[in-house]
Amino acid sequence: MAEKMPEGERTQLVIFKLGESEFGVEIGQVLRIARLMEITRVPRAPRFLEGVINVHGEIIPVLDLKKRLGLPEGEYGDQARILIVEVGDQKVGMMVDSVTEITWVPASAIEPPPEMVAEVSGVYLTGLGRLDDRLIIILDLSRVLTTREVEELENKPPAGSEPAGG
């Protein structure tokens, strides 16, 4: 029987793909993983905001994580998922190409990003994890949006709810 590592010496990550790159996020940031569903477009939305979805009666804005992170864009296939996370007090969906696994990563396998990479990637890149022969880019999804962008999402009325004129 394998000996359990003491808490604090490992992190549980949700591993997902955007294009050919693998990313990870601490499982505590992910409220739910949903299959890609029909997304209702929102007029005059930021380029990376795909629209909104209805999850159990709750309207949740969905952003394209590839567009938000400035990665090469492409079509989302059958394996695409929406990671629903909480940013401030707002639930936000983030589209990814696929969720490949949920796994424990020893703290010793996670390094801070090199200084040049950290400067380019902003505050949402928290580290790089080595998992066997793979390199996992670890993100803090709660920091992918600025405070202003979160406020804009909170104040954006769902499509079709604009007051009728006349």
Image (cartoon, rainbow, N blue to C red):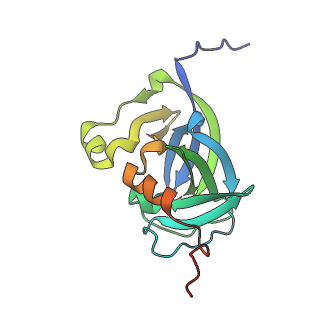
Q: In the rendering, at what x and y percent does residue 125 appear?
A: 39, 41
Residue at 46% x, 26% y is 109
The image quarter containing residue 152 is bottom left
Q: Position of residue 29 (x, y in %)?
A: 56, 38
Residue 51 sits above or below residue 12 on the image:
below
Indicate the quadrant containing the N terminus: top left, top right, bottom left or bottom right: top right
Nearest the eye: 121 or 47: 47
The answer to which of 21 and 146 lies nearer the viewer is 146
Residue in front for this viewpoint, 8 or 22 = 8
In this rendering, the count of numbered labels is 0
- The image shows residue 16, relative to residue 79, as above or below, that is above
Residue 89 vs residue 105, the one in the foreground: 89
Q: Position of residue 146 (x, y in %)?
A: 38, 50
Asked whether residue 31 appears in the rendered view, the answer is: yes
- Residue at the extreme front: 166
Task: Residue at 57%, 42% (x, y): give it.
Answer: 15
Residue 130 % position (x, y) = 47, 33
Residue at 30% in and 41% down: 118
Which picture quadrant has residue 75? bottom right
Quarter of the picture containing the C terminus is bottom right
Is residue 146 visible from the viewing direction of this image? Answer: no
